[in-house]
Amino acid sequence: MSKVIVITGASSGIGALSARALADAGHTVYAGIRDTAGRNAPRLEEIKAYNEEHGTDLRGIELDVSSQDSSDAAIAAIVAEHGRLDAVIHNAGHMVSGPAEAFTPEEIDRVYDTNVLGTQRVNRAALPQLRKQGNGLVVWVSSSSTRGGVPPYLAPYFAAKAAMDAFAVSYAAELARFGVETSIIVPGSFTTGTNHFANGGRPSDQATVDEYEVKYPNLVEQVAARLGALAPADTSVSAVSDAIVAVVDAPAGKRPFRTHIDPANDGAEEVAAVADRIRVEFLTRIGLEDVLHPA
Ligand code: NDP
């Protein structure tokens, strides 16, 4: 059945690919994009052209996850048009790299704002509708860094993604009795095919960066290159959008709690399997096993 779906951060990379793949699968997809009147205006033209070519129902919508007003307005417009919202996909994110010490607290705050608080704004806009319906799906685009082996120099981003993943795990249990399902997508590093690495931010405190550069020369570049070298040559980020379509199209109540897509295999799947097993066992031990699955 065709679903009404909103995905954040759909101007590029995984978000843009997933929005198109979901539309190809027959869904009505709202591609949440910020600054559609300015920098990202061409993205709306691309969406229009995509629909003309593929006969899809893909719709660009202004959605800046850093703004509660923007998140509220986007969700309200979708619900006003369709009277329902079947799936929310938290994909917007931003990476920064550099020595942890060189980031000001305000810079780390902004990373946390986009990657973590952005999901909270969208949830506060959308979840009342999903709870009222008594059904729906929340998909979180997490990161294998939350559980796998990680290189240095990505601390604020990794910390934020770990926080986002922790929110997803708790939200899953809190939404289950409302019939709302949670599924976490766990990509490994994809250094090409998205703007993730190309648009990565850097700390402003150059003096501290320079001091670290003496002991860790060119580590930022080395990390990106070494992560890229780990992945098999035929790696494509479309594997992530394929996984998102598979989750959305799986039968309600039967969706996987986590899906790992990590061609380089940083070990996250192994660690997450233990953590997710403990979650099941612990919730069962405290008599809350019903919240493991949507009612
Ligand atoms: P991209 O940089 O291509 O995509 C990030 C998207 O997030 C862009 O559309 C960007 O919009 C958007 N965005 C950033 N800030 C905001 C905001 N305030 N409001 C709305 N949208 C915003 O990278 P990816 O496609 O790789 O990243 C998508 C997700 O996948 C992220 O959550 C990332 O953490 C996760 N991920 C990526 C991995 C990778 O290796 N590529 C690995 C693991 C997880 P704009 O164009 O306007 O900046």
Image (spheres, rainbow, N blue to C red):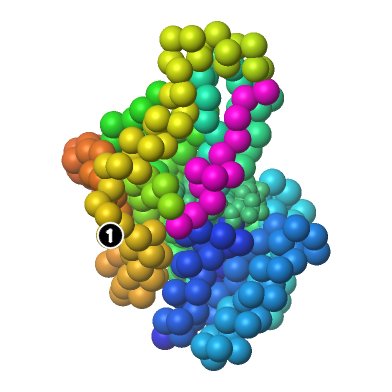
x and y percentages locating residue 68 in the rendered image: 72, 50
Name the residue beneath numbered marker 1: 234
Residue 227 falls left or right of residue 94: left
Q: Name, please, the residue furthest toward the right.
A: 37
State whether residue 190 appears in this view. Answer: yes
Viewport quadrant of the C terminus: bottom left
x and y percentages locating residue 206 in the rendered image: 65, 17
Viewport quadrant of the N terminus: bottom left
- Residue 198, compared with residue 5, is above or below; it is above
Q: Judge the density around disc 1: few (<14), some (14-19), many (≥20) Cα neighbours within 10 Å.
A: few
Q: Nearer the viewer, residue 274 or 177?
A: 274
Q: Quadrant of residue 210?
A: top right
Magenta includes 194? yes
Q: Residue at x 55, y 88 (%)?
A: 53
Q: Residue at x 55, y 34 (%)?
A: 96
Residue 61 falls left or right of residue 248: right
The magenta span reads 193-204
